[in-house]
Amino acid sequence: MKSTKEEIQTIKTLLKDFRTAKYHKRLQIVLFRLMGKSYKEIIDLLDCNQTTIWRNVKKYEEFGLDSLLQETRGGRNHAYMTVEEEKAFLARHLKATEAGEFVTIPYFRLISFLHT
């Protein structure tokens, strides 16, 4: 992996910034690869697997440094809904359940939530 001193310095600076703390392992992986360390050395240093190293290096090579600083995890979308939005969402499924349509939300859990 070819690198410039600027790239290495930028990553070292980001590693000192507490705001990027949750991305430090990703940054360390790329930094060590830029510094010429082998996958085996990085595995030993950071206690991560080869796939993690490969994925982060590939992401860096294809999309740049910013791609390592983005949250990539999915999640439960309803966690971002307000209580009112979630109740409206669940009410639609309740109507479908009562009409005999197939729904994925357990009926009793839905009823108990709507009556709270």
Image (cartoon, grey):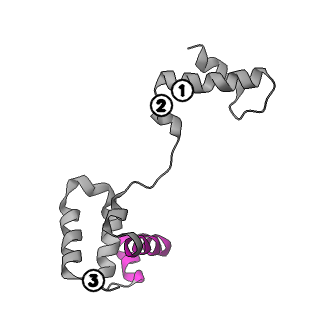
- Residue in the image at 36% along x and 70% along y: 46
Q: Which residue is mark 3?
A: 3
Q: x, y percentage for residue 20?
A: 26, 56
Viewer-nearest residue: 71 or 85: 85
- Asked if labels 1 and 3 touch by Cβ distance under 8 angstroms, the answer is no
Give the class, few, some or many, for how many residues have Cα within 10 Å of label 1's Cα (few <14, many ≥20). Answer: some
Q: Which residue is mark 2?
A: 81
Assign the C terminus to one quadrant of the image. Answer: top right
Assign the N terminus to one quadrant of the image. Answer: bottom left
Tag 1: residue type? Glu
Q: Which residue is mark 1?
A: 86
- Asked if labels 2 and 1 touch by Cβ distance under 8 angstroms, the answer is yes
In the picture, residue 89 is in which quadrant? top right
Q: Which residues are magenta?
A: 39-61
Viewer-nearest residue: 49 or 66: 66
- Residue in the image at 53% along x and 41% along y: 76
